[in-house]
Image: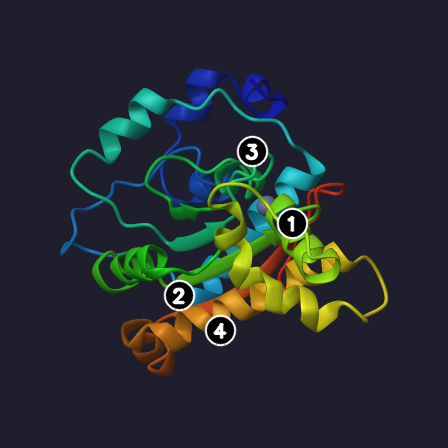
Amino acid sequence: MCERCTGMGRRAFLGLAGAAVAGLAGGFIASPAHAAGGPKTELTADQALEKLKAGNARYVTDAQVCAADLSGQRHHVTAGQAPWATVISCADSRVPPELLFGGLGLGEIFVIRNAGNLIDLDVVGTVEYGAAVLGSPLVVVMGHQRCGAVAAACDTAIKNATFPGSIGQMIEPIVPSALAVKDVPGDIVTNAVKENAKRQAARLVERSPIVSGLVQSSKVKVVSAFYDLDSGKVDFAL
Ligand SMILES: [Zn+2]
């Protein structure tokens, strides 16, 4: 349990209610959620983005995870969900969105993960459900430092490397990003990760009339991001 909890006393910490606590605790106490078709989050895309930034800042400066009241949180979300952001991130074990955005609880963010944070049919459909049905106003496509999938795509692009099983076919969509940055100064994998995140975010909007329509009507915002393993920071300005 972190100092914030022990300082206040766990009972007092968990007993506090309302938005002020949600803001302080960054979502350790889940708001009552609603079934699909019920009330959605009242946060705008910009407010959701600020909440993710604040959560990540908390993670960077004070990366302690509270003993979350998972049983209590589960009780609040049994009837449904109203996530306030959708995050598409890599399957890499070092980049769990709920933790690096400050320790988010059950029912807060809609998370899709695969190697290389790629946009395929399954991801498009999942994002559409999150945005159009559950009312999630923000979509983040987040790459990360030293991504193995992107590094493999760079090796394919530069060294004609091959990989066993389905891995080579899986990373094919990343190869154009690797080729696009191969002559850019700096670390090629880092540059390719950022390029891939931007391209996948654009691909999502291109492939989904539902998402592009929500973006055009300013109900949804799609952004790309880069997670720095060394610092813990998420950069949204790619
Ligand atoms: Zn990765």
User: Percent position (x, y) of residue 238?
Assistant: 66, 67
121 lies above or below 108: below
In this orientation, which residue lies closer to the viewer: 124 or 225? 124
Q: Are marks 1 and 2 in contact (CB under 8 Å)?
A: no
The residue at which mark 2 appears reads as: 44
The residue located at (24%, 45%) in the rendering is: 81
Separation (CA) of disc 4 from disc 2: 21 Å
Residues packed near mark 3 inside 10 Å, few (<14), some (14 to 19) or many (20 plus): few
Q: Amino acid at mark 3?
A: Ser
Give the mark nearest the N terminus, 4 or 2.
Answer: 2
Q: Amino acid at mark 4?
A: Ala
Q: Quadrant of ligand 1?
A: top right
Q: Amino acid at mark 2?
A: Thr
Give the mark nearest the N terminus, 3 or 4.
Answer: 3
Residue 52 shows in this picture: yes
**Residue 202, numbered label:** 4
Residues packed near mark 4 inside 10 Å, few (<14), some (14 to 19) or many (20 plus): some
In this orientation, which residue lies closer to the viewer: 229 or 36? 229
Residue 117 shows in this picture: no
Q: Secondary structure at mark 1?
A: helix
Give the mark nearest the N terminus, 2 or 3.
Answer: 2
**Residue 152, numbered label:** 1
The residue carrying mark 4 has its beta carbon less than 8 Å from ligand 1: no
